[in-house]
Image (cartoon, grey):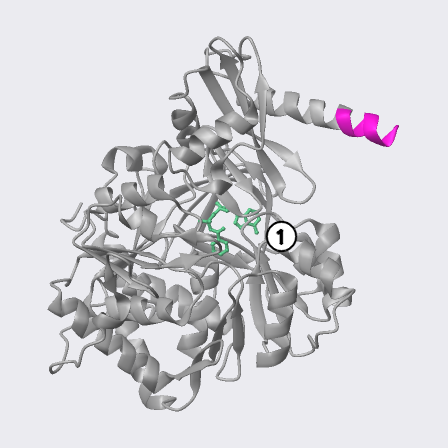
Amino acid sequence: MSDTGAPAWPEEFAARYRELGYWTGETFGDMLAARARSHASHVAIVDGDRRWTYAELDERANRVAAGLRERGVGHGDRVVVQLPNIAEFFEIVFGLFKIGALPVFALPAHRAAEIRYFCEFTEAAAYVIADRHDGFDYRTIAGQVTVRHVFVVGDPGAFTPFDSLRREPAGEIAGPVASDLAFLQLSGGSTGVPKLIPRTHDDYLYSVRASAEICGLDERSVYLVALPAAHNFPLSSPGTLGVLYAGGTVVPAPTPAPDVAFRLIEAERVTITAVVPPLALAWLDAAKRTTADLSSLDVLQVGGAKFSEQAARRVRPELGCRLQQVFGMAEGLVNYTRLDDPEEIVTGTQGRPISPDDELRIVDDADRDVPPGATGHLLTRGPYTIRGYYRAAEHNAHAFTADGFYRTGDLVRRTPAGYLVVEGRAKDQINRGGEKIAAEEVENHLLAHESVHDVAVVSMPDEFLGERTCAFVIPRGTPPKVSQLKAFLRDRGLAGYKLPDRVEVVAEFPMTGVGKVSKAELRAEISRVLAERLAKRTGA
Ligand code: OOB
């Protein structure tokens, strides 16, 4: 492990990835500077009535970089960025890229518990927020973290105005090199605390460039940021970075609600956007009634969770655009259906890898390859898949194989044509409509409640979100109600999407042969309960 806390690729792999032209030595700061030269007056970002050209975005990033430097933030420093979808997100992120400081990409849904942890664990130098968004005041979190600086877009309250960061650059800024870390991304996780994913300029920019090509982006592309901008999918698959690489235009949406998103698609002639399956369903339903002109929309990307074949078939007829399925992970590997694939591949698979050098293995519980076409655990390594989490040596020992394959925790099968179909998940995680919840993290918080003797958190099927969260509780004294447990977790500062949707009180847990709680049986049990309830309601 190097002193950056990030396990690097072995030199023979790094050399090969350079030789093959995947790692080019370009940084994200270089990329923006190059676009500011080649596309100076082309619009890069549209946020409300603000339209920033490439020249302006680059100049703003340089100014913010100078301001960060003046405040003592520099190369290798970590900065927790928690912003809604606004233009300043790109200004600060590129400002940080320019000086080699590392954004830590928090989501707007995170609350004090998560943010405190990110700040402490990464020893962050600064925390960047907007004053308020979606009815929440982020300055209340800022009061609870120990960082040197809090920069606030909007009304700064007791903190430092983001505007004061914009300084006149004094000469050239010495930037990072492409093999340096560019940022820390969050893992969906399956452990007690979220894991951080270290990505380099070299590896990430490769995935961005290749994704932009697969998705046919060019300077006429207009990308609507419907999902939270910091998430890996809208950031780089091909996302905002892919569109900026291609010289196109990025349109951040304040919310993905169909009325807002559809108005923006019409007004800015959006050509491509990315959503999670529940949003795709909401858009499909809203498309029937809308008066908005969606004719510019060429590609709807759907990913983050399994999109049902039935819903996938509706996209072209009902939204009038092409569908692209995306099965990716912040750790690296991203699979796409290709835009010219036949309909049955686009609707029936989750795509194939970006790179000819993405190595995939599908294995059984003992890491033996399963026969072709059989379902097994997906392992992967390649030119943009990490070799280890940030500062997590112990966890890395089992999250990766000895020869560097990442254990994705996904159960997949491969079609004869090389496309992946996601069949399930082996990791202890709930995928709530694309939002990932580590069961153990929620369990640890619930165990602190006085009425909880023991708890097991599992997924339960949900028609709209795919999965929701069910907490099986063995009570101590009076059994707790779901509303009480939710309030308790909210008070502890946990993000709203992690609160359990349902609580089942039980006297004991079913056990596996080796004496572990059988989550498989708990999942089966809650599915049975829900199916019975549904049968009763529908009189079946
Ligand atoms: C994306 O990234 P993460 O890091 O939030 O979550 C990764 C996990 C995968 O391991 C898998 O369990 C699940 O999310 N997943 C899917 C899926 N896409 C992601 N499961 C079934 N079908 C899909 N299409 O979610 C992400 C990152 C980049 C691009 C797209 C998604």
Label 1 crowding class (10 Å Cα cut-off): few <14, some 14-19, many 20+? many
Q: Quadrant of residue 61?
A: bottom left
Q: Quick check: 421 left or right of 455?
A: right
Where residue 68 appears, as percent x and y from the top left, is: 18, 67
Query: Seen in the image, is 175 located left or right of residue 399?
Result: left
Vertical arrangement, residue 531 with respect to residue 123, above or below: above
In the image, what residue occupies the spot 33% across and 84% down? Answer: 56
Q: Left of 24 or right of it: where is 534? A: right
Q: Answer yes or no: is residue 446 visible.
A: yes
Amino acid at the residue labelled 1? Pro
Label 1 residue near ligand 1, CB within 8 Å: no
In the image, the segment drawn in magenta is: 533-540
Quadrant location of the C terminus in the rendered image: top right
Instruction: Residue lying at the far right in this picture: please name it.
Output: 539
Q: Judging from the image, what secondary structure is the residue with disc 1 in?
A: helix
Verify whether residue 170 appears in magenta: no
**Front-most of residues 381 and 165:** 165
Is any part of residue 24 visible from this angle? no
The residue depicted at 30 percent of the width and 68 percent of the height is 92
Residue drawn where x is 46% and y is 48% of the image: 360
